[in-house]
Amino acid sequence: MTLVNVRWLMLAKDLGVSDVSLRRWVQEEKAARGERPGGLSRDEREELGRLRGENAKLRMEREILRKAPVAARSAAACAA
């Protein structure tokens, strides 16, 4: 057992929790702060969700605008 593992075990025992729970809590907090490599902070995850929604809306609007001239020509041809 390494010195780091012993420290985790002692700290977990002092807090009255298992060492596995303590490590998981620390990992979750690091991820929430964006300190873990590849992990996004809470704020970044919220912003990513907002941006994905906005992106989906813009794609839908672009598709509607792309189809609009075709629909206008079809209506004009039918009226003539």
Image (spheres, rainbow, N blue to C red):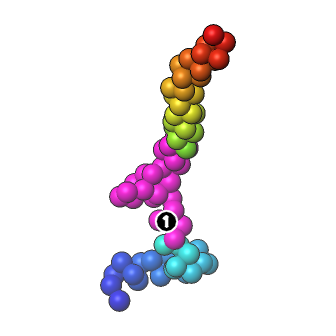
User: x, y (%) of residue 51?
Assistant: 51, 37
Helix, strand or loop for the magenta stretch, by majority: helix
> Which percent across, then down, holds residue 4?
36, 78
**Is-magenta flag for residue 29?**
yes
Q: Is residue 69 above or below residue 2?
A: above
The kind of secondary structure element at disc 1 is: helix
Quadrant of the image occupied by residue 5: bottom left
Q: Residue furthest right?
A: 79
Kind of residue at disc 1: Val
From the viewer's side, name the closer residue of 40 and 3.
40
Q: Quadrant of residue 8?
A: bottom left
Quadrant of the image for the N terminus?
bottom left
Quarter containing the C terminus: top right
Image: magenta residue range: 24-48
At label 1, counting other C-alpha atoms closer than 10 Å, the crowd grade (few under 14, some 14-19, many 20 or more) is: few
Q: Is residue 36 visible?
A: yes
Q: Residue furthest bottom?
A: 1
The answer to whether residue 7 is magenta is no
Give the residue number, with chain letter if any, for mark 1: 26
**Which residue is more in the foreground, 54 or 25?**
54
